[in-house]
Image: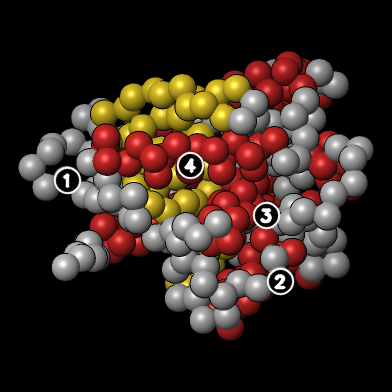
Amino acid sequence: MDHLPPLARAAGCEPAVVDWLVDLAEIAQALPGLQSADPARRRHAAQELSDALARWFTLPGPAHCQVTAHRVPTRTGAVTVLHYRPPGDADRTPLAHLSLHGGGFVLGSVHEVVNDRLLRHRCVASGADLFAVEYRLAPEHPFPAGLEDCLDALTWLVATAPDFGIAPDRIGVGGISAGGNLAGLVAAHARDRGLHLDHQVLEVPGVSLHITQDASYQQFSALSDFGDLTAVRAQYLGPAPTTAWTAPAEIPDLTGLPPALVLTAELDPLRDSGERYAARLAAAGVPVATWRAPGHLHGSTSITRTSARARAWQDRVSDFLRGRVARPTPTTS
């Protein structure tokens, strides 16, 4: 990873991003598990790297945000869902947001320091209840296992929403990177099951598993650690063929999907596919807000301690959610 900082400087990354990459490369050298063929060992090392970076580059979240863990039943067992609840009960919001972490379908966890810090901030800044899902990961659990966990978590949240003081019809979904892929699919499957979600938030989303022809991939793939995308697809999808949607770009009809916020990063290989999907949503009549973060990479928008643009990114998500919170709850007569 030593090659990344000079490439990032040449590509026009903002200085805070270059500093983040310098530390990333230095910490990664001391973590041989990142190269392990064993998925569990590689995940452990990846979380060590993520946590070390977050402790320095990501601002701590508010301590007074309440966090509760739930074991949520799924069709194959149970998953952990962390509930981030804003402080105070006087003016309870009727809005909930199902949050899906990133990690390329093979890494990542709700227990990462970076996810906890960002979700605490979003919860308090927006006034929304956030529910983070520890979905199963490939290659041990290939597609559609992770997606099924997210859909089952949504089913649980809709059924139990009144217990949390939440309106069942005021639930949305969002995710970053691979989590953005899953969030887009959850929104579409929910629509097709007659459940129309309140909103969707897609951050540097992996809306397509076939991006090697995109200009952004060809320009900026050297600035990412995606590796061989053919191998990534093989790990995630497994050996069994499927005709199911594996990414939002495969959904033929986008009409009736919930209002969306789609955020992309200027120097991200996934930029073009994300912006293409946002344009398709808008063409289908879906209200869409978009923003491209200048000088940022895939994964760098969490560095809120050192980057004003990263803080602006997080504020855009919080502002969007707060706007959904502020919408009046429909009444029936």
Which of disc 4 and disc 2 is earlier in sequence? 4
Nearest to N terminus: mark 3 or mark 2: 3
Give the vertical position of 253 relative to 285 (above or below): above
Tag 4 residue: 155
Question: Is the Cβ of the residue at disc 4 closer than 8 Å to that at disc 3?
Answer: no
Residue 69 at x, y = what percent?
A: 39, 23
Secondary structure, mark 3, is: loop
Looking at the image, the residue that sits furthest to the left is 90
The amino acid at mark 4 is Thr
Q: Nearer the viewer, residue 216 or 2?
A: 216
Q: Is residue 60 above or below residue 241?
A: above
Of helix, strand and loop, which one carries label 4? helix
237 or 315: which is nearer to us?
A: 237
Question: Residue at horizontal 34%, vertical 24%?
Answer: 68
Percent across and percent down for residue 22 are 63, 37
Camera sees residue 231: no
- Amino acid on which disc 3 is placed: Gly
Residue 193, position in %: x, y? 55, 57
Label 3–label 1 contact, CB within 8 A: no
**Quarter where residue 11 is shown:** bottom right
The numbered dot on residue 252 is: 2
Q: Residue, x 8% and y 42% (percent of image)?
A: 90
Residue occupied by mark 3: 206
